[in-house]
Image (tube, helix red, strand yellow):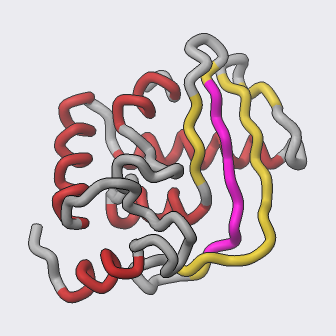
Amino acid sequence: MKMTPDYIEAHNKMQPGVITSEGFLGNDTRKLVEIIAADESEMIRLGITFEEVYEKLLYLQTEGEKALGEPSTVDGKWIVQAGDVRGKLPSPFGDGIFHKNSVVVQNVVTKKALIYSRLSLHLLEKYHFLQGKGSPFRLDPVDMKEILEL
């Protein structure tokens, strides 16, 4: 994959202070396409797909939203808390504006958790971008496989 002008622009918008105070890249110094390619390879190695992860995270978000900001147990496997935050965030790719929210999914057995947002789901589904290492909203493939029991 090549760093096209669109990817260069998106990478620049992902820097701290542009769209969010912490940005989307954490302490990851790789190019955007390198981050995506590495995560795509890791997903294949783990035997999970972006589509199944997206569907599971969307399902958990939808179920969590029913509790109106309170933690709730979903399917006896996860504690989910979905909360809204005031405001909106644009996609760094310039293809939409997303209501701010955060979803925390904790596996009841391992106690490990993921945190993500509507924008995180969009980036995962459309671009296979899971955010850079060290980003607070990073969706690490190994963690997703374990926490989501895929």
Query: Quarter holding the N terminus?
Result: bottom left
Looking at this view, is 90 or 62 the one in front?
90
Vertical placement of residue 118 versus 140, above or below: below
| Residue 80 as seen in the image, left or right of residue 14 | right
Residue at left offset 20%, top offset 88%: 5
Vertical placement of residue 16 versus 54, above or below: below
Residue at left offset 45%, top offset 48%: 138
Q: Position of residue 10 (x, y in %)?
A: 34, 79
Q: Position of residue 65 (x, y in %)?
A: 80, 48
- Quadrant for residue 31, please give it: bottom left
Query: Quarter holding the C terminus?
Result: top left
Residue at left offset 52%, top offset 51%: 137
Q: Position of residue 18 (x, y in %)?
A: 49, 81
Provide the major secondary structure of the magenta segment. Answer: strand
| Residue 134 as seen in the image, left or right of residue 98 | left
Q: Is residue 135 magenta?
A: no
Q: Position of residue 139 (x, y in %)?
A: 44, 44
Looking at this view, is 114 or 55 the one in front?
114
Q: Is residue 101 magenta?
A: yes
Looking at this view, is 82 or 57 the one in front?
82
Residue furthest to the top in view is 109
Residue at left offset 69%, top offset 71%: 99
- Quadrant for residue 131, please give it: bottom left
Q: Which residues are magenta?
A: 98-106
| Residue 20 as seen in the image, left or right of residue 38 | right
Residue furthest to the left in view is 2
